[in-house]
Image (cartoon, grey):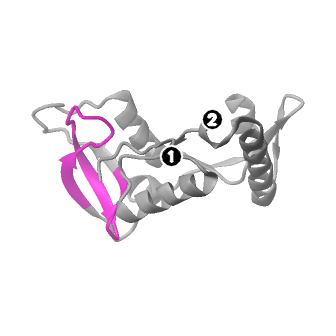
Amino acid sequence: GATSMFASGNTVREATKEEIKNPFPGSKKVKTICSICSAGCGIVAEVHNGVWVRQDVAQDHPISEGSHCCKGIDQIDLVKSKQRVKHPLKKVAGKWQRISWEQAINEISEKMLKFRKENGPDAAMFLGSAKFNLQQAFYFRKFAALWGTNNIDHVARI
């Protein structure tokens, strides 16, 4: 699916050099450890308005010595990718078609509500991020409560 999506040429665009180098102007870099797992790999986090928005490997860290696990490197790849999705896509009859954000949200919402009605609220588990700040964790928990469940995991390292 990804090949046909990228081959069309108008679904994704190439990221600019500035977006790859520094996607959040005004952010500051902070040497710390990765919070994806508990190994303690060294990273350089990019912080913008108090929010951890990007990370890169710390080459001189004594534990990880410039390496990173697949979870941590995936976080790096997500923000450094040269591709940027312009709009939501839906695979119809084996081909990717552009759809509106409203259509995507409505279709996903309908599926979630149907699943909840048929299986109950505890049948779904909502997964968050170890990088949640207190406010994000509060809203994440509030969303789960509105859904009707306590079945959440945001790697509670807040």
Q: Position of residue 108 (x, y in %)?
A: 74, 47
Name the residue at 41% across, 42% down: 75
Name the residue at 44% across, 52% down: 20
Magenta residues (range): 29-54
Mark 2: few, some, or many residues within 10 Å (few <14, many ≥20)? Answer: few
- The answer to which of 90 and 107 lies nearer the viewer is 107
Q: Position of residue 98 (x, y in %)?
A: 81, 48
Q: Is residue 105 magenta?
A: no
Residue farthest to the right, as pictured: 93
Q: Is residue 52 magenta?
A: yes
| Quarter of the figure with the N terminus | top right
Q: Quadrant of residue 125?
A: top right
The residue to which callout 1 is attached is: 150
At label 1, the amino acid type is Asn
Is label 1 in a helix, a strand or a loop? Answer: loop
The residue to which callout 2 is attached is: 123
